[in-house]
Amino acid sequence: MRLFKSHQRRAGARTTMTADPVLVLTADTVALTFQIEILRSQGCDVVVCTDLRQIQDLLGMPIEYWSMLIVEIEGFGGISAVIGPLLTLRRANPDLPVVLASTRMPAHDFTQERLPICDASLALPCLASDLKVAIQNALENNEAWQRRVKDLEAEMYRGPETVIPALNDASPAEPDLDATEA
């Protein structure tokens, strides 16, 4: 039995609650049952994966098949258990919007503070309207993340003289002889 289904993402800009396939990573489907049903009622094709180790398979798959990844982190042991795979996933696939969901989050976070890990954070339980806002913000924040990754890559390819110009232009510091004589 194949865990992941293949889908072709539609060309063009992503929109909120589209029928594009959404991958949900959760150790216990009960944690996200409501959110999964909301997505399906909006016409989204939702594929559920219950094994964190399968994220490595996701990295090897054509990522363009997925419109979004929603990860419920508590079932896998919390943020400390998923942060490594998420960082790897984000570096390898910056164009995949990621929403973290957790029962331990005190509030939703739709800011760009956590972009190296995710595009939006959803506190569970939540309303259907919260999920919609999380998806909208994840799509917008993902565009910002992609720009940030491209800017960092461009800086790296320009060489050290542009990344750290102050170090390349600086002359060696001369010892202050007056201070050592005192």
Image (cartoon, rainbow, N blue to C red):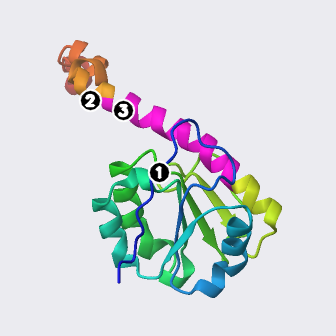
Q: Which residue is identified by label 2?
A: 156
The answer to whether 154 appears left or right of 106 in the picture is: left
**Mark 2 to mark 3: distance in Å?**
6 Å
Q: Amino acid at mark 2?
A: Met
- What is the magenta range? 135-153
Q: Looking at the image, do the residues carrying marks 1 and 2 touch, with CB atoms under 8 Å apart?
A: no
Q: Looking at the image, do the residues carrying marks 2 and 3 touch, with CB atoms under 8 Å apart?
A: yes
Q: Position of residue 30 (x, y in %)?
A: 64, 87
Q: Name the residue at 50% across, 71% down.
A: 79
* Position of the N terminus by quadrant: bottom left
What's the mark number on residue 152? 3
Between residue 68 and residue 144, name the one nearer to us: 68
Which of label 1 and label 2 is nearer to you?
1
Q: Position of residue 63 (x, y in %)?
A: 38, 54
* Position of the C terminus by quadrant: top left
Confirm whether the magenta stretch covers residue 137: yes
What's the mark number on residue 96? 1
